[in-house]
Image (tube, helix red, strand yellow):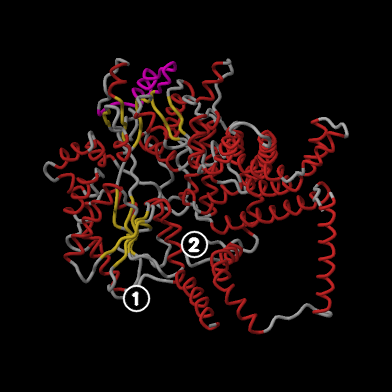
Amino acid sequence: MAVAAARELGEESGLRRQRRLGRQASPGKPRRPKAGEQIAAWTFLTPGVALIMLFGVAPVIWSAVMSFQRNNLFSPNTPFVGLANYRQMLHDPIVGQAIEHTIVYTALFVPGTMLVGLFLGVAMNRPLKFISVYRTAAYATIAISTISEALVFIWLFDPSYGIVNYLFSLVHIPQQQFLSSPSEALYVIVIMTIWGWTGFAVVVYLAALQGIPQVLTEAAAIDGAGRWATFRRITLPLLSPASLFLAVWLTINALQLFDEVYFSTSGGPLNSTTVLVYYLYEQAFGGANFNFGYASAIAYFLFIVIIVITAIQFRAGRRFVHYRS
Amino acid sequence: MRRHWLGAAMASALVAFGLAACGTGTPNSTAGGLQIWEGYTGAEAKAFTHLLDVWNKAHPTEKVTYLYVDNDDSLPKLLTAVKGGSQPDIAYVYGSWAPNVAQIPQVVNLTKVVQRPGVNWDDFWVGERDVATVKGEVIGIPALVDNLAVVYNKALFTAAGLQPPSPNWTWNQFVADAKKLTIPAKKQFGTAYVTPGSEDTVWHWEALLWEAGGAILNSSNTKAAFDSPAGLKSLETLRTMAVTDKSMYLDPTDSEYANLFNSGRIGMLVTGPWDLSGFPSVKYGVQIMPSFPGTSGGHQTISGPDNWVIFNNGSKRVAAAEKFLLWMTATPQATYFSLHTGDLPIRKSVEDSPGFLQKMDQALPEVDTFITNLGNVKQARPQIPTYPKVSTILGQMIVSVLLGKSQPQAALANAAQQVNQALASGSN
């Protein structure tokens, strides 16, 4: 305790010293770098900035322009159509369905992955035999490519030859159509992607769990808190920064779901797994539609939705997240 | 010292820009060689590079170099290249993209080229010529042709006590055979259908529609024509197998059906010659498509040809590209390519050359039926930029019937209304 207190004191005095020095060095405004330093800094930055401009910013701006055009990329004739592409979204029934599927998917996938990840993370955060084997196994789901993952799940859930229906038949559950059924396919994709992202969530939670000082849980135990109370009152709040990170990160990824849909169902059957990003891909490249203007408008709509949701999550995070300080 | 690293950083920035901006070479000169983008792999790649070597030896000033570009991805890459002014001289382009590709200003009009003496344009199959022609202008030279026929498992037919299908069989027979070939306990299906709702779903049905005497659109491509007795007959035939008899394995992945056929789980498949090499484990036969008796359609099939397209990089390079393509697709080279790859001959004269069919069958058993079936390609899909939209609507219609979600008549009417709307509002 004494050591920690001393360290804290030390840090504090150091900070104060820095502040004082800073004030002395630059009364008023921060120091302006010399011209030579400016050039040097920009020279170092130029290659990176150039690449980001070229492959990041330029396409982003170009697609913004395209979203106001009728553009199929073939014809040099690209008339400006104002908000027509955005207005078309309002009247496109498949956009409505795609938004609904995206919301349902996100609402199931994000909490699902976090719960499974939390459960496995807590289960693995103790000295078990072969613990590294379990941890590697959980992490392996990230290392496996999406295509292999989709192919395995297609076979697991094959209506006629899949192992899931076989297991169902053993316990007399009626045979399901899974990916071939418009009412079940989306849920199979939820299961598939939760499996795929679990490793990621486990790693994040494990790292956060190891950062929780034992003194706190021990103190709680001495105070008479049971296992569940300790978990709820100590562990869970201290995991909240990790939870916020996962919620934001998984939500962004869920809203951009594409690979698993592309490889397993192509948005079908009957558009039942068409999510926004898959639909905009379809409009741009799939089936030779070449509606690049419309696809760009959908992309920008999604972009704005993601920004808004992320902002809400961070704002909500202020209330629920405990940073140790 | 400082100047030293400053220079290095500037140079790396310049390289980054330069890489993105580099083009195909000297404008309007064949120096450095023509560039061709193609997506051949395996035996096709071997045969193609052999032919390139032959050409390059004979034409040292008009050499052709190739760049492998996956066919599925070639269009985005082409569009990007065209925007940057670095398009190749020749590219392999899917036939279904033709009406859209024709809008690229750099695409060379070949209408007069294919009329040159010795080209013998009519020697290409009518299905190929249709797909290479957009609004009366020839924009491509046929690169590949295929068609659909019925591939069946001989052992399963014998086990079910069925006669193998004959060339004059009917869809009623197909449905009855599929029912007999279905054994639920063994997880064995009479036939299969691909149901991703993509063009692959659609063109299988279009063959049935034409055989029943129907048409996709009216003759001026302005209105739907498939909501007809022929449309109903074709959809009901599929529905009987998928919904009533449950003799049809529905494959949303568009790939598993081939594995299932190869492991003896499926009796008959309507598919193309590209699948044959994937069936080494079963003894299969090939028969042309059955017909609907009492209709005007007879035995037909559908073809999905692809094109070589030339891009304008200056008149000298265009002239050299034309010369090369005409050589590449002439009878001797086309014969060599088919015999070494098992691909169907792109010219009628190749099929007619003595001993050709036997040699093909040695390489790929029963492929000769697909070759003679090329004569049954009597119609092409509408060559309009709106076709992809039409196809999407038809795909949903077919899948909804096969999944038992809607009745054929209602599905047809609903799809026809959507297609009419799409046609009226134009290509975008």
Distance between the alpha carbons at the discs numbered 1 and 2? 23 Å
Callout 1 and callout 2 share a chain:
no
- SS state under label 1: loop
Q: Main secondary structure of the magenta part?
A: helix
Q: Residue flagged by tag 2: what amino acid is it?
A: Leu
Along the horizontal axis of the image, is B300 left or right of B59?
right
Nearer to me, A57 or A49: A49
Q: Which residue is mark 2?
A: A73
> Is residue B74 magenta-colored?
no
Which of the labelled discs sits on residue A6, or is there none? none
The percent position of residue A149, horizontal first and vertical second, equals 51, 38
Q: Residue flagged by tag 1: what amino acid is it?
A: Pro
The percent position of residue B358, horizontal first and vertical second, equals 15, 38
The percent position of residue A196, horizontal first and vertical second, equals 58, 40
What range is drawn magenta here? B167-189
Q: Which residue is mark 1?
A: B27
- SS state under label 2: loop
Along the horizontal axis of the image, is A22 left or right of B349?
right
Nearer to me, B409 or A318: A318
Which is closer to the viewer, label 1 or label 2?
1
Q: What residue is shown at x 53% (from left), y 23% (from top)? A: A165
